[in-house]
Image: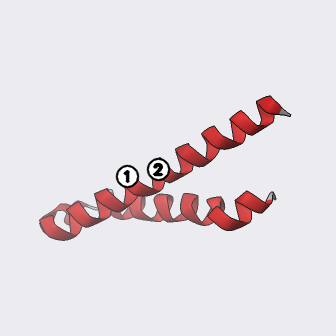
Amino acid sequence: MTKWGLIFDLSAKEREVKKLEKEMSQESFWSDQEKAQEVTKRVKELKDAIGEFNELKDNLEELA
C-alpha cells in the first residue's frame, strides 16, 4: 500500500460504503427521513473521496 493509501485509508472508506449501502437497502431505512438523508450524504462524501483518490493515483501513475 502506498503512503497515500495509508493516509486516506481507501479500504476503510470502501467498506463503509458497502455497509451503508446494505443499510440503505433495508425496507425500514427510509422511514426515518432525517437519518436517511445523513446516510446518503455520507455515502456521497465517501464515494467522492474514493473517486478523487483514484483520480490522483491514476494521474501519478501516468507521470511515472
Q: Which residue is mark 1?
A: 44
Marker disc for residue 47? 2
Under tag 2, what secondary structure?
Answer: helix
Question: Measured from the top left, where is residue 55 in percent x and y?
Answer: 61, 38
How far apart marks 1 and 2 lie (CA) works out to: 5 Å
Q: Is residue 21 left or right of residue 51?
A: left
Q: Residue 55, can we see it?
A: yes
Instruction: Give the number of callouts.
Output: 2
Q: Is residue 32 left or right of residue 23?
A: left
Q: Residue at x 36, y 65 (%)?
A: 23
Q: Are marks 1 and 2 in contact (CB under 8 Å)?
A: yes
Residue 35 falls in image quadrant: bottom left
Under tag 1, what secondary structure?
Answer: helix
Marker disc for residue 25? none
Amino acid type, mark 1: Lys
Q: Residue at x 54, y 43 (%)?
A: 51
Q: Is residue 36 left or right of residue 23?
A: left
Residue 57 falls in image quadrant: top right
Q: Residue at x 21, y 61 (%)?
A: 37
Amino acid type, mark 2: Lys
Q: Residue 29, can we see it?
A: no
Assess disc 1: are there few (<14), some (14-19) or many (≥20) residues with their C-alpha within 10 Å of its C-alpha.
Answer: few
Relative to the observer, which residue lies in front, 21 or 56?
Answer: 56
Question: Measured from the top left, where is residue 63 in percent x and y?
Answer: 80, 31
Which quadrant does the N terminus fall into?
A: bottom right
